[in-house]
Each structure stands twice: as structure tokens, then as C-alpha cells.
Amino acid sequence: MEIRKASGKDAEELAALFNHVEDSGFMLFNPGERKATNIQMEKQIEQIEKNPHSVFLVAASGHDLHGYLLLVGNGLERTRHSAKIVIGIKEGERGKGIGSRLFQEMEEFARLNGIRRLELSVIANNVHALSLYAKMEFEQEGVKRESLFFDGMYHDEYVLSKLL
């Protein structure tokens, strides 16, 4: 398995992966609430490629994608040292080191591109993700109390960061 930058050729497989991951119930959207398309993925890849403070990584075996990590930065002078992370791993592939490898590659990119602060948020009951983030040395900064509503109840969201 290799960790590499996403390309336009990945759009179809990436759309399917996004939809699979979002159906897990651990992302911002409810299962089935948003469906990624090939065209949306192509546009997102193009936008990320144009931003020198961002990278779109995939974990791939040939044309099969097992996970992705988006690092989204900006060019504003006061915050260009900071970037947000979105990560997703195919359900059957979790716990196999893919997330760690994606984070390692992303951190190398971040260091080379002047990014010092990494940020992400996670649903408080996502124990597998929290375990990965702790392993990658992210620290909890705060709690967005009852920021999400699903399964008939309110859920907290943790805000985490890591300084490089």
C-alpha cells in the first residue's frame, strides 16, 4: 500500500470511499445525507492542488483506495501556519496502520510548507478515532457541547490540535 497525493484519476473511487465513510455515522453528515460525485471529487482535488497550504492524500493499492486525509490550510497571514484535517478510512481497513501512515505523510508535508498547527474535530464517542489521534499526539483543546444531533439525541464534539 502506498500513501500518495490524490489525482483526478482517483475521482470515481474517491467518491465511493467518501460515501462509504460518511455512511459510518462518525462524520458530520448523517448516512445518506450527502452523496459525493465524481465531478465534486475532481473539483475538490483541483482546488486542493492550487492551494500550497493544502494536500489531499490517499492510501492506495493500485486503483483501490483504503483511506484519505485532507489537510486544508489558507493563505491568510495570521493563520497560514494552521490547517484543518479531515480523515476517513474504509471500515474493513481500520486498525491496520493506514491512519498512522496518512498522518505521518501529512505531517511531513506540513513541516515542509510552514504549517505548525494541525486541527481537527471528532464526535466524542468515536473511540477508534480518538485512539488514533492520541497515538499521533493530538491533544484535546475543548468540547463543543451538544453540537451534533443524531440517533434521537445530542452529542458532544471534541476539538483537538497538535503543534509541530
Image: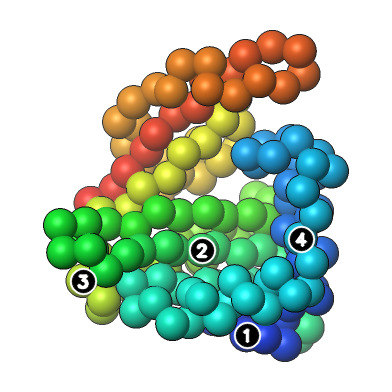
Residue bearing the label numbered 4: 36
* Mark identifier at residue 114: 3
Q: Earlier in the sequence, mark 4 or mark 3?
A: 4
Q: Position of residue 65 (x, y in %)?
A: 73, 72
Q: Earlier in the sequence, mark 2 or mark 4?
A: 4
Q: Quadrant of residue 79?
A: bottom left
Residue at horizontal 72%, vertical 87%?
9
Tag 3's secondary structure? loop
Q: Amino acid at mark 1?
A: Ser
Query: How far apart are labels 1 and 3 at the CA level?
Result: 23 Å
Query: How far apart are labels 1 and 2 at the CA level?
Result: 13 Å
Query: How far apart are labels 3 and 2 at the CA level?
Result: 16 Å
Residue bearing the label numbered 2: 70
**9 to the left or right of 114:** right
> Mark 1 touching mark 2, by CB under 8 A?
no
Front position among marks 4 and 3 = 4
Q: Is residue 48 above or below residue 107?
A: below
Residue at horizontal 26%, vertical 78%?
112
* Mark identifier at residue 7: 1
Q: How is the image coloured?
A: rainbow
Q: Is residue 78 above or below residue 109?
A: above
Q: Amino acid at mark 2?
A: Leu
Q: Amino acid at mark 3?
A: Gly
Q: Amino acid at mark 4?
A: Ala
Relative depth, front residue between 77 and 22: 77
Q: Quadrant of residue 74?
A: bottom left
